[in-house]
Amino acid sequence: MPDYMLMVLENEAEHAAQSPASMAELIQKRAEFAEGLRSAGQLRDHGRFRPSREGKRMRREAEGRRVQSGPFAEEGKALGGYYWVEAASVEDAAKLAGACPALASDQVDVRPLMKGRIDHDKDDKRGKIFGCVVLGNAVTEESWTKVMDCIDAETKDNLPDSFIGGVRLQPPTAGRRVAKRGERQAMFDGPFLESKEVIGGVFLIQAASIEHALEWVEKAKHGVHGELEIRELWRS
């Protein structure tokens, strides 16, 4: 079956306003959601990001690299987690996204994979794991795809020894967005280019700290054509 990424876009202010008990309940429900996908043979990987205020963004500019510290909540939204799943169609993947436990202010973007690989013992590895989110900014989907093609061509043979997995996503028009409207759910077709940056892929590396992760990122070319957001994953 085809593979899809369910990317949970969270309103970080709303999440921060929840009581510890409410957040613990949401985390538990998401763990049960992941276990249900695993039991059904549909889950390939999943992860939960630490708050974007702890992250970094890097872009190459004429005068050198530009590193920006978080938070990075686009219109109040930041990537809070992901589920890499198998589903028969994008419609079936969107149904899974609709079942993902979330606050009313959250959204779940569903994007088919162009390619991907993951170390299946990722969660057994010691140390910190960082998710590197590849971002592109373009007026049209065609120009956004060209940016992603350039990044892919110039980085696919330049992965670090600490690389433990990653995905490249198909263009936004191939995806869906699931959002709540009161007690009801609404589903929207891509593209989602109204956002300042559109996610083109995510890859995972092991590093002792976010500064060590940045040292490798500085040598890579992800930040030449687009921008790279680096966030640590919570360890379960």
Image (cartoon, rainbow, N blue to C red):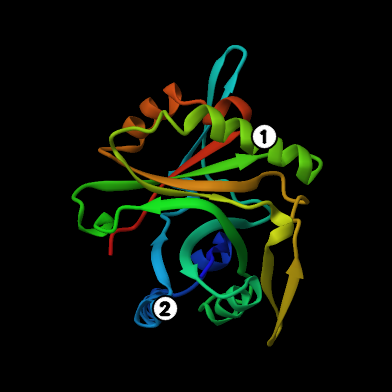
Q: CA distance from mark 1 to mark 2?
A: 33 Å
Q: Secondary structure at mark 2?
A: helix
The residue carrying mark 2 is 37
Please state, as top left, top right, bottom left or bottom right, where the C terminus lies in the image: bottom left
Q: Is residue 138 visible?
A: no
Relative to 6, say whether 93 is above or below: below
Contact between labelled residues 2 and 1, with CB atoms less than 8 Å apart? no
Q: Residue at x 38, y 33 (%)?
A: 159
| Amino acid type for the residue under numbered disc 1 | Val
How would you rate the neighbour count of disc 2 (Cα within 10 Å): few for under 14, some for 14-19, many for 20 or more?
some
Q: Residue furthest front?
A: 1
Across and down, in percent, residue 23 comes to: 42, 74
Relative to residue 99, is residue 183 drawn left or right? right
Q: Which residue is mark 1?
A: 147
Residue 223 picture quarter:
top right
The amino acid marked with disc number 2 is: Leu
